[in-house]
Amino acid sequence: MPVKAAESGIFNLRNQHYHGFQQGDPQVSRDGVVLDLYSDEGNFEVIFLEREYANPAGVTQPEINRIVQSLRKATPGEVASSASTEIESTPRLR
């Protein structure tokens, strides 16, 4: 279902593993961008909320493209090793 961001455009996107749609043009609107990605094994959605984004220009299309091109399904070994990895917390600096 289209979201408000889709008012600035809906675009096809794909990489080696996924295909789908991008709702929203980051050059036109700051209403965010929604990626709906599908494969034979499932689907997922990525939402970029830009109102609080640190960069005043917002997320850029090249950044979105890099994220999409880097997405892939994790292998069972990667999933198992990430589940057993402990993340160390870093003390906050004051």
Image (spheres, rainbow, N blue to C red):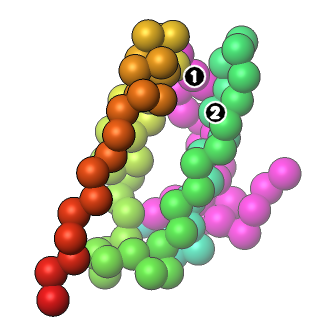
Q: Is residue 56 left or right of residue 46?
A: left
Residue 8 location (% of width, % of height): 61, 64
Q: Are the two marked residues, 1 and 2, in contact with CB atoms closer than 8 angstroms? A: yes
Is 70 within the magenta? no
**Camera-nearest residue between 16 and 12:** 16
Q: Is residue 83 left or right of residue 1?
A: left
Residue 37 sits above or below residue 15 on the image: below
Residue lying farthest left?
93
**Camera-nearest residue between 13 and 46:** 46
Residue 79 location (% of width, % of height): 48, 21
Amino acid carrying mark 2 in the image: Leu
Start-end of magenta stretch: 1-26
Is 25 within the magenta? yes
Q: Which residue is mark 1?
A: 18
**Marker disc for residue 54:** none
Residue, x 72% and y 69% (percent of image)? Answer: 4
Q: Which residue is mark 2?
A: 37
Residue, x 67% and y 37% (percent of image)? Answer: 44
